Amino acid sequence: MTFRFAATAFALALLAAPLSVTAADSGLASMPAGTYVIDPHHASLIGSVSHFGRSTYVFRFDKFDASYDYDPASPDAAKLTVSIEVNSLDTGWDQADREFSRDFAGSAKTPVARFVSTTITHSGGSGVVTGDLTLNGVTKPVSLAVTFNGYGPLGPMGLLGKKAGFSATGAFKRSDFGLTKFAPMVGDDISLQINAEFVAKK
């Protein structure tokens, strides 16, 4: 009887807890030094491109990974590494996925695209991450405008652990990577929108 009462009380506490979840500290200095890895269940990598100038075609990559090394004493020395399975490109239309992965995203030459940061600059909770993107067998620099959304406990009473959240936007020309098929019907400029949560590597 005592156990049942305790379990009921705990369940009620969970229901009420979201009203008092600890807010994330917005300062980068609050995040401990270490290696952080992406939470794949709370991350998205979305791209968009002009379609005949009539609409913006949106796609996403369903399989990607990322990690970064961080030291609050030297935040600009952080190192970010991202890998993207190009064949996981998802437009919502299977035929387009196969063609886009091969002809539009260069999966034949680079099945796993990679981004490795080279420089990071920040001011407060925002900054710019510049790195080398390897796509279609070509490596070129790409810059991302990044916003730090905070670090701290998530979920009722922090049961989901501590996470760091980031949002980023960027753009590049696919022709820089030798990807010109479907042009000019499909545009040259690719816009990126990224959202991700990271946890400390155990």
Image: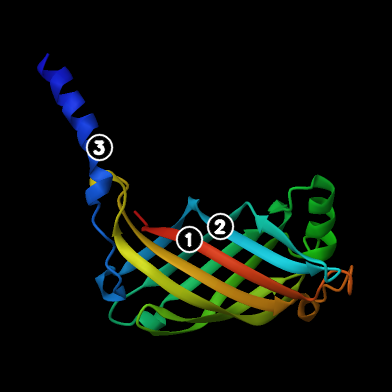
Instruction: Give the labeled residue for mark 3.
Output: 14
Note whether 167 is above or below 74 in the view shown: above
- The quadrant in which residue 140 appears is bottom right
Q: In the structure shown, which secondary structural element does the residue marked by tag 1 occupy?
A: strand
Circle on res. 196: 1
Q: How crowded is mark 1: few (under 14 residues within 10 Å), some or many (20 or more)?
A: many
State left or right for residue 69 relative to residue 145: left
Closest to the camera, between mark 1 and mark 3, is 3
> Residue at position x 84%, y 48% from top?
95
- The quadrant in which residue 183 appears is bottom right
Closest to the camera, between mark 2 and mark 3, is 3
Q: How crowded is mark 2: few (under 14 residues within 10 Å), some or many (20 or more)?
A: some
Q: Which of marks 1 and 2 is nearer the N terminus?
A: 2
Type of amino acid under label 3: Leu
CA gap between label 1 and label 3 equals 25 Å
Task: Give coordinates of residue 63: x percent, y percent.
Answer: 61, 52
Q: Residue furthest top?
A: 1
Type of amino acid under label 2: Ser
State left or right for residue 107 relative to residue 182: left
Task: Give coordinates of residue 99: x percent, y percent.
Answer: 85, 56
What number of labels is visible? 3
Q: Earlier in the sequence, mark 1 or mark 3?
A: 3
Instruction: Give the labeled residue for mark 2.
Output: 44
Q: How crowded is mark 3: few (under 14 residues within 10 Å), some or many (20 or more)?
A: some
Note whether 141 is above or below 53 in the view shown: below
Note whether 30 is above or below 73 in the view shown: above
Circle on res. 129: none
Contact between marks 1 and 2 (CB within 8 A): the answer is yes
> Residue at position x 79%, y 47% from top?
93
